[in-house]
Structure formats: structure tokens, C-alpha cells
Amino acid sequence: MAVASTLLGSAVFKVGTTSGTAVDYSDNATNVVVTMMKEELDASTMGATYRYRVGGLSDSTFTVTLLATAAMINALYALVGTNVYAEAKRDSAATSATNVLYKVTGGLLASVDVVNQSVGELSEIEVVVSGGAVTTATT
């Protein structure tokens, strides 16, 4: 079962090829969601009258909606199809047990909207980083 955590307020979001090159897009973020999950595997046996399931491999998705600029879109487009580093946390305050920093290494940035315009609206793009190895920090 997926456990989702929606990050509101002054959330932090960074993405880049490595932690050292990650660009901070926090000021442009309007929505950040980090989803942690386990694959659902069927563990039912012959003669069972109900399905039994167990958790398999871990998986994650970091999804952020950004108010876009041309420079940002170009920078993110350069990362499409590559494995990236991303990090997110609920608040820009210090990392702690209640403000956990989630970091993914080797996540896939599969696509970026390079044109997403509507008359009378700010340009927004959605960036999704999926998979990779997730670690957390509380200090």
C-alpha cells in the first residue's frame, strides 16, 4: 500500500545529476508530493479462499509542480531520460525527525513539459522523478 506525504508551505525541492549539482527549485514549487511504496506481490497458495499479499521491492515517486521559466525548462529538459538525484522535505526549516529530508539517487526523470501555456495563467510544469534508491535524513 502506498504511503503518500504531501508537502505544503515552504517545501524544499532540488534536482540534478548529483547532490552537488542539484538545483534548488523550492521558490518555484507550488506542490511537492513524495510517495513511498512497496510492490504488491501475490502470496496466495493453492486451496486458499482469499488472496494474500506481501510487500516486494520498494519504489518511490517525487512529483513537483513548478512555476516555469524558459531557463528552468531548458535545464530540466537536459536531464530527461537520465538518472538523477532529487531531494524534498516538508519545510525549509532545519532537517529533523518532524521535517525529514527525503533523497533519491538514480531516479528516472522521464519527461518534462517543454510547452504548457494557457491564456491568462502562469506557466506550470510537472516534474516526476521515479524509482531509485531513497534515503532519509533527520539531522
Image: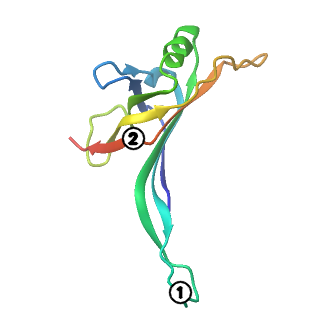
Percent from the top left, x then y, of residue 32?
A: 50, 36
Q: Residue furthest top?
A: 71
Q: Secondary structure at mark 2?
A: loop
Percent from the top left, x then y, of residue 11?
A: 43, 33
Percent from the top left, x then y, of residue 1?
A: 50, 62
Q: Residues within 10 Å of mark 1 (few under 14, many from 20)?
A: few
Q: Which of disc 1 and disc 2 is earlier in sequence?
A: 1
Residue where numbered disc 1 is placed: 46
Cα distance between the residues tagged 2 and 1: 35 Å
Q: Residue at x 55, y 25 (%)?
A: 66
Q: Residue at x 42, y 30 (%)?
A: 83
Q: Residues within 10 Å of mark 2 (few under 14, many from 20)?
A: many
Q: Residue at x 50, y 19 (%)?
A: 76
Give the amino acid at mark 1. Answer: Met
- Residue 99 visible in the picture: no
Residue where numbered disc 2 is placed: 132
Front residue of 22 and 105: 105
Is 125 located above or below residue 69 in the figure?
below
